[in-house]
Every structure is written in structure tokens, then in C-alpha cells.
Image (cartoon, rainbow, N blue to C red):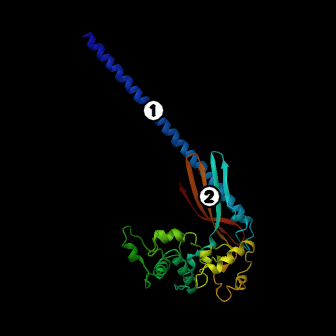
């Protein structure tokens, strides 16, 4: 009888010990997870502060620029290299969005397509691999106009309502370039190809000849021949245009380029900044506008974890 009681006592003691070990392990694990979670939250907050610092840096750089003529040799165009900061690093660069074709410049106030802008965007779409640019142009115009009339190759609400996840046409100017993904005629692959060439800007924003890439410049004349613009791109690094009409004085372009919608300065920029603290890595995109008084304000911002 005593032996049996001793055995039960031993088993009970072992069970209590086992439970204590399991509880201790669980508490240790929970404590470690809680500590890691707290650490991640602190790193995330710290990275956000660094990104805000990068945004403030960009605003100061742009505010110091005169913006009468903007080109790639100015201070704003120099990237912020990877800079060591407490716990990690930060980097960033400014992009002139007016060096890209303005997607909101094609549709006129009377809902008709501007033929010059239409020709330029048609050319750019072709370079991005779009085999049906006319259909894409009509769909883009239908997305932007306020009516529900469908253009010959366009698309209105009835098309988008029939999709697996229904939605309606925008019926306004594009707010972001990625909005193209919602529009009929634009594939994800084409939108990726278009990213360095187009932007969603205020309709009046001009294309800066001093910062536009070769692919966009080559669509300013009907030939679409990039070789005509290669010399110009090389020359503008040393001698940027001070006036749009200077372009017409250059032999290859006289009588070939319509200066409508072209300029030599910029008011809209994109900051791409990245901050890393510990295991946390964040990227921020900030659209910055310079007003007539030279004040720089944030138009929009988007942040993602990497």
C-alpha cells in the first residue's frame, strides 16, 4: 500500500515538474516573441522617421532650386547615396515626373482627343509592346471622360461591371500611373514597361525636354526614330535647353516637332526613398509639387514594406 502511495506521489511530482517545465518554456517563448514584436514595432517607427527625414531633405533641395530651367545636372537630380544611420541605413532619389508623358494631357475639355498628344502616346504604347494602341487610347479616354458613351474601341461601366471583381470607370483624370491596370487594353506587363515613360499629372503639366528619356523624346515626331534624338540627349547633358524654341533651331528637328505641351522646367517630382532598420525595410513614394511661390508640398505618398 505504501509502495503504491509512494508511486502515485512520484508520478504526481513528475507531472507537476513537467507542467512547470512546459509553462516555463511557454513563458520564455511568449516573452521572446513579445520582445521581437516590440523590437519590430520600434524598428518600423524608426524607419518611418528616417523616411520622413528623406522627404524633408527632398523638399529643401527642390525649394532651393529656381525652376526656371530644370535639367539632370542640377542638385535635385543627384541621388542620396546609402547613408548609415542609427540601426540601419537610408537612401533616396528624386525623379522629374515632367520628364514623362502626361497621361492626363490627351483628353481635351470638350471630351475630344488632342491629335498631337494622341500621336505621342500611340507611339509610346507601341514601344511598350501594345499591339492595339488605338483600342487602348479609346479605353483611356472613356475612363477619363465624364459621360457614359463608348468610343469605337473603348470601354465604359458595362465592361468593368462584368469583371470578376466589378467596378466602374473612373470618369476623371488619372490619379496615379498604376490606375492603368484597371483600364481595358493595358496589361500588367505593358504597364511595367510604361512606368519610366508616363505619369498621371495635372493636365496642364508640360513635358520637360531636358529630362525626358530617349524613348519619350523619339515620340515627339511622327517617325518615332530614336536615332534622331541620340545626339540631342548627349548634348543636353552639357548644354540643356533654356527655351523650347532652341530645339527647333537644331537641324534634325526644324519643321518636324510641334512644341505644344513641351517645356524646359518642372514643378512635379517623385521621391523614392528606402530605409532599413534591423529586419525592417520600408520604401516610400512621395509626389511633390512646387507652387508658383516656390513652396514645395506633398501631393500624395505611398509606403510599402519590403
Q: Which mark is residue 166?
A: none
Q: Which residue is mark 2?
A: 273
Residue 266 location in percent, x, y? Answer: 68, 72
On screen, residue 281 above or below 175: above
Q: Residue at x 65, y 76 (%)?
A: 230
Q: Residue at x 56, y 86 (%)?
A: 115
Pointer 2 with pointer 1, Cβ within 8 A: no
Residue 135 location in percent, x, y? Answer: 45, 81
- On the question of residue 202 being in view, the answer is no
Q: Is residue 120 left or right of residue 21?
A: right
Residue 35 location in percent, x, y? Answer: 52, 38
Q: Residue furthest bottom?
A: 255
Q: Is residue 17 left or right of residue 51?
A: left
- On the question of residue 42 being in view, the answer is yes
User: What kind of element bears circle 1?
Assistant: helix
Q: Residue at x 65, y 45 (%)?
A: 86
User: What kind of element bears circle 2?
Assistant: strand
Q: Quadrant of residue 209?
A: bottom right
For discs 2 and 1, the disc positioned in front in the rendered view: 2
Q: Residue furthest front?
A: 227
Mark 2 Cα-neighbour bin, 10 Å: few <14, some 14–19, many ≥20:
many
Q: Quadrant of residue 99?
A: bottom right
Q: Which residue is mark 1?
A: 27
Q: Residue furthest left?
A: 1
Amino acid at each position: 500500500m505504501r509502495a503504491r502511495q509512494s508511486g502515485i506521489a512520484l508520478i504526481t511530482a513528475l507531472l507537476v515538474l513537467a507542467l512547470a517545465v512546459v509553462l516555463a518554456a511557454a513563458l520564455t517563448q511568449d516573452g521572446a516573441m513579445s520582445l521581437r514584436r516590440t523590437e519590430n514595432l520600434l524598428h518600423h517607427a524608426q524607419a518611418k522617421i528616417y523616411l520622413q527625414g528623406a522627404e524633408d531633405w527632398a523638399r529643401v533641395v527642390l525649394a532651393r532650386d529656381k525652376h526656371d530651367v530644370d535639367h539632370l545636372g542640377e542638385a535635385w537630380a543627384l541621388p542620396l547615396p546609402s547613408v548609415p544611420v542609427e540601426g540601419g541605413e537610408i537612401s533616396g532619389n528624386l525623379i522629374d515626373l515632367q520628364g514623362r508623358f502626361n497621361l492626363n494631357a490627351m483628353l481635351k475639355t470638350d471630351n475630344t482627343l488632342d491629335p498631337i498628344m494622341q500621336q505621342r502616346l500611340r507611339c509610346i504604347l507601341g514601344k511598350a509592346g501594345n499591339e492595339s494602341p488605338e483600342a487602348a487610347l479609346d479605353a483611356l479616354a472613356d475612363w477619363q471622360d465624364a459621360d457614359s458613351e463608348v468610343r469605337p474601341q473603348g470601354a465604359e461601366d458595362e465592361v468593368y461591371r462584368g469583371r470578376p471583381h466589378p467596378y466602374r470607370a473612373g470618369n476623371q483624370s488619372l490619379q496615379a500611373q498604376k490606375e492603368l491596370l484597371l483600364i481595358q487594353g493595358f496589361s500588367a506587363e505593358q504597364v511595367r514597361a510604361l512606368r519610366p515613360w508616363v505619369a498621371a499629372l495635372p493636365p496642364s503639366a508640360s513635358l520637360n525636354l531636358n529630362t525626358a528619356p530617349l524613348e519619350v523624346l523619339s515620340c515627339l515626331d511622327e517617325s518615332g526614330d530614336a536615332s534622331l534624338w541620340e545626339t540631342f540627349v548627349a548634348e543636353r547633358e552639357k548644354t540643356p535647353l533654356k527655351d523650347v524654341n532652341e530645339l527647333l533651331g537644331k537641324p534634325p528637328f526644324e519643321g518636324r516637332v510641334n512644341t505644344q505641351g513641351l517645356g524646359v522646367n518642372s514643378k512635379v517630382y517623385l521621391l523614392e526613398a528606402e530605409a532599413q532598420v534591423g529586419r525592417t525595410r520600408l520604401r516610400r513614394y512621395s509626389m511633390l509639387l512646387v507652387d508658383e511661390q516656390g513652396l514645395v508640398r506633398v501631393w500624395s505618398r505611398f509606403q510599402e514594406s519590403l
